[in-house]
Image (cartoon, helix red, strand yellow):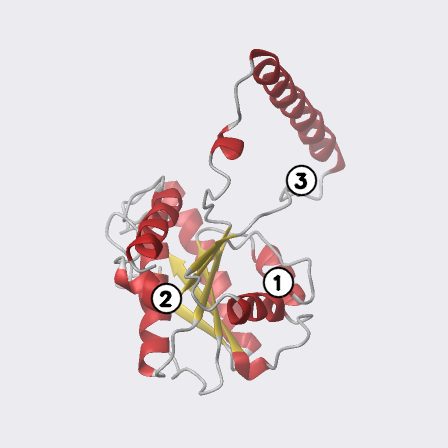
Amino acid sequence: IIEKQHDECKLSVLIPIYAEDFRRIEKQLKYIDRQKGINQEEFEIIYLVNNDKDDGSERWQKAYQKNEIAISNLRALNKPNVHIIDKSSKGNEITQCNVGKARNRLVAEGSIRFHENGKDGILIQTDADTFFQDDLHFSKTIQLFDEYPEACAISGGAVWSFDPDTADDALNDAYHEKVETIFLLIAWSALVAFDSGSHTYREAFPKLFGGFHMISKSFASAAINGLITENSMEDRLFGIELGLYAKRHG
């Protein structure tokens, strides 16, 4: 149970957390605090800290420990527009937890909150290891829906940043070398595709939705029953369903 949505809220940012280093979440909130052109009462952040049922594994224990740190630190911030849904502590876990179930639970929460507030609000879905570079991102998003009131969703983009969870310079150097190799392989694949006249997946589907940045209206998100509760393709299919919903309703 989390606090009632503020009457002035227009936008809800939905973020699943699973075994994330809290330094990333701190960075994310630091950038959110920089948002301009919008009052604190006009947006909210909902974190869903999630984990599966205890299976006795070392992997579960490590995730549990990181999640407990995240829950404790987020609560200590005592920010009125930052809410935490604990689906990690023992007894609260999500059975057979996966990213689809976590995102779907967040969309349900955000949609219900706006419905109870008598609004068709804006839901921004992102991940715990992302941050908003544009200090006007929230206000621009609200403005965009004001300009296009018939729109029900936006496919958001992202810029990738290499940021390993280590302060070890030797490890950082090794990681950078591997990443550079990966980028060379990707570039080579793109050149081969270009030479053969084929298109990349993103070019073929420019409206492709990615879980790192999906924007939708709360009513449409609820009307399509949220996301599928699977561990992959939940974001892609969410975008496709919203597109079909838009066509059906003009």
**Residue at label 3?**
162
Residue 52 percent across, percent down from the top left: 30, 50
Of residues 17 and 131, which is closer to you in this image?
Answer: 131
The local crowd at label 1, few if under 14, some if 14 to 19, many if 20 or more residues have their Cα within 10 Å, is some
| Residue at 65% in and 72% down | 33
SS class of the residue under badge 3? loop
Q: Kindly check if marks 3 and 1 are in contact, taking CB atoms under 8 A apart as contact.
A: no
Q: Which disc, if any, is residue 86?
A: 2
What is the spatial separation of the Cα atoms under label 3 and label 1, in whole angstroms?
17 Å
**Residue at label 1?**
26
Q: Is residue 89 visible?
A: no
Q: Nearer the viewer, mark 3 or mark 1?
A: 3
95 relative to 223, above or below? above
Q: Earlier in the sequence, mark 2 or mark 3?
A: 2
Amino acid type for the residue under numbered disc 2: Asp
28 relative to 162, above or below? below
Q: Is residue 80 visible?
A: yes
Residue 118 percent across, percent down from the top left: 34, 83
Of residues 78 and 114, which is closer to you in this image?
Answer: 114
Question: Quadrant location of the N terminus?
Answer: bottom left
Q: Earlier in the sequence, mark 2 or mark 1?
A: 1
